[in-house]
Image (cartoon, grey):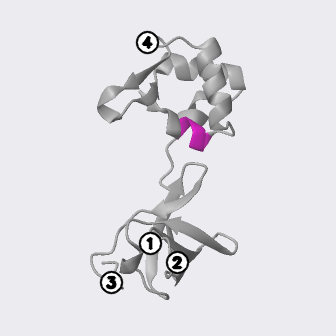
Amino acid sequence: MTPETTIISNSNLARPQLLAMRRGKFEEGLHWRRNKARRGRVEWTMEGVAGLAAEVGVEIGDLVQIEDGVLAGIVTWAGYPNSTMIQAKLEGVEGRVLVKVRDARLYMPGMKCEVRRNGERGWMESKRPRSRGRLV
């Protein structure tokens, strides 16, 4: 079973496009199902992934490929009124990006951080600091 979020992050499909395809051309139970243990998240069977790959015109491996996309960066700002956001400069990414974190009070400007992609929406922390200013 492949989570739908993995398919979205590995393809050029937007969530509304995938939702329209899922409702129109794919059958629940045979091609996809809702996992009640994971709050109703949609998971695709291999038969569904194969049909989706044929519909979109890509290889099956491109849709289910899981990237270990952890990037290192340096925090540039952590004083936003929203206590779940920081700003960081990441290696290999142009400019500064907003990163969703659990608690921004644990971060300080100049501190190292590790982030990963959050689907198509942006970036999120992959490793949380144990105490303020200390990643290890």
Q: Amino acid at mark 4?
A: Gly
Q: Which mark is residue 44?
A: none
Give how far apart the Cα atoms at labels 4 and 1 are.
40 Å
Q: Amino acid at mark 3?
A: Arg
Q: Amino acid at mark 2?
A: Tyr
Q: Nearer the viewer, residue 2 or 96?
A: 96
Mark in front: 4 vs 1? 1
In the image, residue 119 lies at what x, y percent? Answer: 55, 48
Residue at numbered disc 3: 132
Other-residue count near label 3 (Cα within 10 Å), few / some / many at <14 / 14–19 / ≥20? few
Which stretch appears magenta? 6-10
Q: Earlier in the sequence, mark 4 or mark 1?
A: 4
Q: Is residue 53 left or right of residue 36?
A: right
Residue at numbered disc 2: 80
Q: Which element is circle 4 on?
A: loop
Q: Is residue 1 left or right of residue 60?
A: left
Residue at numbered disc 4: 29
Q: Which mark is residue 83?
A: 1
Give how far apart the Cα atoms at labels 3 and 2 are.
16 Å
Give how far apart the Cα atoms at labels 3 and 4 are.
47 Å
Residue 93 position (above or below residue 3): below
Give how far apart the Cα atoms at labels 3 and 1 are.
14 Å
Q: Amino acid at mark 1?
A: Ser
**Magenta-drawn stretch contains 66:** no
Q: Earlier in the sequence, mark 3 or mark 4?
A: 4
